[in-house]
Amino acid sequence: MEVPNVKDFQWKRLAPLPSRRVYCSLLETGGQVYAIGGCDDNGVPMDCFEVYSPEADQWTALPPLPTARAGVAVTALGKRIMVIGGVGTNQLPLKVVEMYNIDEGKWKKRSMLREAAMGISVTAKDYRVYAAGGMGLDLRPHSHLQHYDMLKDMWVSLAPMPTPRYAATSFLRGSKIYVLGGRQSKYAVNAFEVFDIETRSWTKFPNIPCKRAFSSFVTLDSHLYSLGGLRQGRLYRQPKFLRTMDVFDMEQGELVTFPRKLWLPTALLAGSPSLTPIPAIFQGNQPTVLETAEAFHPGKNKWEILPAMPTPRCACSSIVVKNCLLAVGGVNQGLSDAVEALCVSDS
């Protein structure tokens, strides 16, 4: 696939989010985007549940979450949306699992997690959900890996992760679940581990070279990119935003060395999903809010500056839909209801 030219990218202002909030979870299924939960101006979790239709450029309110919460793990199982764990209105992790039937427009309680947890990483394969890690009521990171069987409405424990953590990134490739990074308390974890669904066993891969929290992980072909993030922890007195980029070749099972000159042009806290075929497009925040958007061109091996985001903000939720990157909500002198899409040409 030909890589688009920088001039082909443009931002579009879309219908605003009906309920201003931050830390909502986004999910795309059936060509629609669902915004689930989040926090209000006072940091209190909300029960908001809305769907965005790209064709109509319109948000529609849906039946609210039975349990108000933020930072939930979400996944789609056919015409059902599964919402797992998160933080409740008492600011504590939850064990609640709820499922929304898109055709019926109704919520149902499902079998709860064995322990309350926030910051769970989920993947789904063959109508089974795999939930890794999380932080419990005791604020300790979990090493749990469990799968949910929708037909039996039952959670089953699998071999625990070698490294306990929460807020990790996980993705499915073939029959393997890759789990990267995460946190233990406020400290970043650079563990990189893979669970084989068929053999039900874990393999440890080389650690991510630069230990940092809130970095983004983007896959392109057989390569995995780890970008940006926040350096903090026992060895560092002051947190620092990073330009670091690490690359892992999943076919060869080894790290690819990228020189400092190929790191991000701007130090960023958080990144966004890829816009195929460009591995990473970012809008993030340093101590001040940025409108920056930058892309790495794999053919040229360099970063390029894209048009700036119309509404500068941080902590926005993001998702790729039909080759457009949607930036939803976030913070800029208060909560933002801005929804904007970075698209290629007329897509």
Image (tube, rainbow, N blue to C red):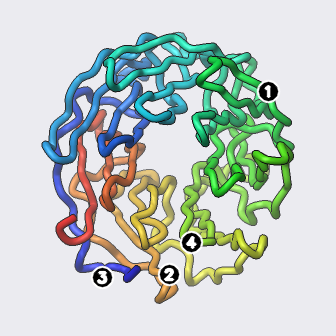
Can you give x and y, in whole percent of width and height, for residue 98 in the image?
Answer: 50, 17
Q: Is residue 31 something one can see in this rendering?
A: yes
Dot 1 corresponds to which residue? 157
Of pointers 1 and 2, the one earlier in the residue sequence: 1
Can you give x and y, in whole percent of width and height, for residue 29 in the image?
Answer: 38, 41
Pointer 4 local density, CA inside 10 Å: few below 14, some 14–19, many at least 20:
few
Q: Which amino acid type corresponds to the residue marked 1 in the rendered image?
A: Ser
Q: Nearer the viewer, residue 332 or 101?
A: 101
Whether label 1 touches label 2, CB < 8 Å: no
Q: Nearer the viewer, residue 289 or 114?
A: 114
- The span from disc 2 to disc 4 (Cα, nearest Å) is 11 Å
Q: Is residue 318 left or right of residue 311?
A: right
Q: Quadrant of residue 200?
A: top right
- The span from disc 1 to disc 2 (Cα, nearest Å) is 40 Å
Dot 2 corresponds to which residue? 298
Q: Is residue 61 left or right of residue 190?
A: left
- Give the vertical position of 230 relative to 17 (above or below): below
Query: Element at badge 4?
Result: loop
Which of the two discs, 3 and 1, sits closer to the camera? 1
Q: Residue furthest bottom?
A: 300
Dot 4 corresponds to which residue? 221
Pointer 3 local density, CA inside 10 Å: few below 14, some 14–19, many at least 20:
few
Residue located 63% across and 14% down the image: 112
Of pointers 3 and 1, the one earlier in the residue sequence: 3
Dot 3 corresponds to which residue? 5
Query: Element at badge 1?
Result: strand
- The span from disc 2 to disc 3 (Cα, nearest Å) is 12 Å
